[in-house]
Image: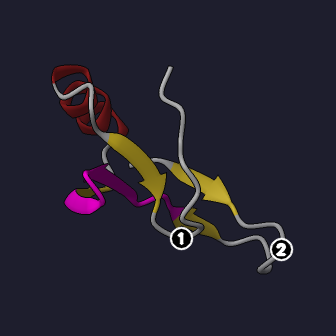
């Protein structure tokens, strides 16, 4: 699970939920970054977004 500190919302820790998309449809919803990396490496046409913000996430 990936945690980040929410400095705007009072400093609590929140899990990042990743959404994996293909052709505009959500295929996977998970909080496991390693799973996301493995899935996307096998399915290059997929994109990943942060479920909370909807912003695309670049995996490195």
- Judged left or right of residue 24, residue 15 is right
* Residue 3 part of the magenta segment: no
The answer to which image quadrant residue 53 occupies is bottom right
Residue that numbered label 2 is attached to: 8
- The numbered dot on residue 16 is none
State whether the magenta stretch is mostly helix, strand or loop. strand
- Judged left or right of residue 32, residue 49 is right
Residue that numbered label 1 is attached to: 52
Q: Earlier in the sequence, mark 2 or mark 1?
A: 2
Q: Residue at x 54, y 53 (%)?
A: 3
The location of residue 51, given as percent across then percent down, is: 45, 66
Q: Residue at x 58, y 56 (%)?
A: 55
* Residue 20 part of the magenta segment: yes
Q: Which residues are magenta?
A: 15-27
The residue mark sitting in front, 2 or 1, is 1
Q: Residue at x 24, y 62 (%)?
A: 26
Query: Is residue 59 shown above or below 7?
Result: above
Which structural element holds mark 1?
A: loop
Q: How many marks?
A: 2
Neighbour class for label 2 at 10 Å: few (<14), some, many (≥20)? few
Furthest residue in direction front, as rendered: 23
Q: Residue at x 41, y 60 (%)?
A: 17
The location of residue 24, given as percent across then percent down, is: 30, 59
Q: Are marks 2 and 1 in contact (CB under 8 Å)?
A: no
Which structural element holds mark 2?
A: loop
- Gap between marks 2 and 1, in whole Å? 14 Å
Neighbour class for label 1 at 10 Å: few (<14), some, many (≥20)? few
Look at the image and name its color scheme. Answer: secondary structure
The location of residue 42, given as percent across then percent down, is: 16, 22
């Amino acid at each position: 699970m990936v945690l980040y500190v929410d400095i705007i919302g009072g400093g609590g820790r929140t899990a990042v939920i990743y959404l994996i998309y293909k052709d505009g449809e959500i295929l996977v919803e998970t909080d496991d970054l390693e799973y996301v990396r493995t899935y996307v490496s096998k399915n290059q046409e997929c994109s990943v977004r942060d479920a909370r913000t909807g912003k695309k996430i670049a995996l490195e």
